[in-house]
Amino acid sequence: MLAIQILINALVLGCLYACIAIGFSLVWGVLNVINLIHGSFVVLGAYLGWALYQWLGLLPWYALLIAGPLFFVLGYGVQRAILNRVITAPVLVTLTLTFGLDLILNNAMLYFFKADYRKLILVPPMGQVSLFGVVVPVDRLMATALALVLTGLLYLILRQTRVGRAIIAVRLDRDAAVLMGVDVRNIYAVAFGLGAALAGTAGVLMALIFPISPLTSDGYLGKAFVVCVLGGLGSVSGALAGGLLLALIEGIGSAEIGPAHATTLSFVLLIVFLIVRPQGLLGRRGFE
Amino acid sequence: MTRSAAILLVLVAAYAVVPLFSDAYLLRLGTFASLYAVLALSWNIVGGFAGYPSFATAAFFGFGAYTSGVLQAGGLPLGVSVPAAALASFVLASALGAVLLRLRGHYFAIASLSLVEVFRELVNNATDLTGGGMGLNIPLSGSSGVLQDATFFFYAMWAVLLATALMATFVGASKLGFGLVCIRQNETAATMVGLDTTLYKTIAFGLSACFVGASGGIYAAWVHYIDPSDVFDILYSVKPIVMALIGGLGSSLGVAIGAFVYLALEEIVWRNYIQIHSGLLGLLIVVMLLFLPHGLMSFRGRLLRRIGRHG
């Protein structure tokens, strides 16, 4: 019984983790930038979802349609105006720059929303269903399903559209892509915009499940780190595998050695993976 | 000894006159200046010389603070607990470095960043030893007054700064420093010519953690109360990088000056805009990285060009 409960929880959480991590992974893989604003984008998305429901009564599933384009434009602008200027600089510079941007965004959120925890509570509540004898809230299931839809959407964009093919081309070989006439700076901005859009929409879904506060952004960012390293960079399937694995390990860890140690466990796992298998579960060696 | 190393040591030595003003605010600021310079000079060994983007400074700062804090709470004097913290940091960092420094670039950055999280969570959960999230109270060392206390901690931190500056000077002038620069420029080639890169990097990581741990130990005694979210704050990892970028990567003198300049900026922002100080700090980082890629040295280049044009 407990085993099934852990498994179902892991499935539900794992898809959400994957959804958070996939945008981070895309930016890391394509731009070679570790984007430390990602966690704050997720929180900003959560506030957007909360505000739209609180003020306009717009349900989170519809809020996704607003959050997606809005965050895409935001991300595109940030990349075009700021990050593209230093894109060829060493890791240290790009990493520190995104840290600086994160400080600004996080401070702005603290200033406007305060550090109080808020919660998006649907009225009337959606109730819960029983799956294999395990009780699961319906809003969580909806969030999970939508997270899968968003992840699938990114997969389709990357595989089926022209701009998606260009993103993959830049990731595989930047110089060759330039020679084939790809506008790399634009592609970087599109990739960053997609990453931001995924973070924002994932945030809207998070608002349904977790309390919202600017202080939670580090937690989301940490999850994105671990999922990317576990699953492997830059692939949709890798992020899904990483997300599910992380949720499973956290679930089992919490049940066996206590929830206080779940974070430690996931980060220790991250370090071990970095050393033993840096390409991740589904990553290919030499793909970088 | 090069000229810039000599200037650095003279600067640090001259800096010891601050207590003569016997102003408590100035002493507090001076102690922080020493602390920041220790962090920046130490980071520069790994980040500047060897070119490894380390974000682990906060991990060893917190580790040193807790090691010395727990020892002091157990009744040991400052003179024993701080060297113990330095030694423990050196040993731990060397052991971790031998493993982690096999990673390069982004992967090393992420791993070193994760180290901070792991340490913080471990300390958070080891409630019996560290007090966990409740924090740790460190007993007052028998002091005779506010000013005497402030002077004492100023000199304690200053002594660590002096040791760090000597260490950085020594590393810069030695074969170790030369080897580290080779590693930054081309690690594969350095290995090919017979340099034991793993050994060099491991020593560098150990040295860079050693004095950070000591400064953490003194910080703990200075503020009398530490908790995990305070001493394992990721800002302790990022600030030294910003200071090094201000002063110019790889140069010990530049990095030390960068630390002082940074402290001055931070103090102005912190004092005037408490509500938005971290946002302004972020803005400072962004503006500097975009417009002054070589830190204060960018000005020198511009100045020289201007002189060249007119003269």
Image: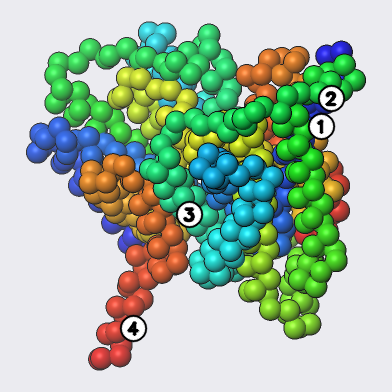
Please give the name of the residue rendered at 49% of the width and 39% of the height, measured from the top-left corner: A214
Of badges 1 and 3, the one in the foreground is: 1
Which element carries disc 4, helix, strand or loop? helix
Of badges 3 and 2, the one in the foreground is: 2
Tag 3 residue: A101
- Residue B140 in percent (x, y) is at 28, 14
Residue farthest to the left? B21
Query: Which of the two residues, B127 or B65, is positioned nearer the viewer here?
Result: B127
Q: Quadrant of residue A49?
A: top right
Q: Which mark is residue A7?
A: 2
- Residue B114 in percent (x, y) is at 61, 37
Marks 4 and 3, how far apart at CA: 32 Å
Marks 1 and 3, how far apart at CA: 33 Å
Of badges 4 and 1, the one in the foreground is: 1
Screen quadrant of the N terminus of chain A: top right
Tag 4 residue: B305
- Residue A6 in percent (x, y) is at 80, 21
Screen quadrant of the C terminus of chain A: bottom right
Chain containing mark 4: B
Q: Amino acid at mark 1?
A: Leu
Of badges 2 and 4, the one in the foreground is: 2
Q: Are marks 2 and 1 in contact (CB under 8 Å)?
A: yes
| Mark 2 residue crowding within 10 angstroms, few (<14) / some (14–19) / many (20+) | some
Q: Amino acid at mark 3?
A: Leu
Q: Which mark is residue A11?
A: 1
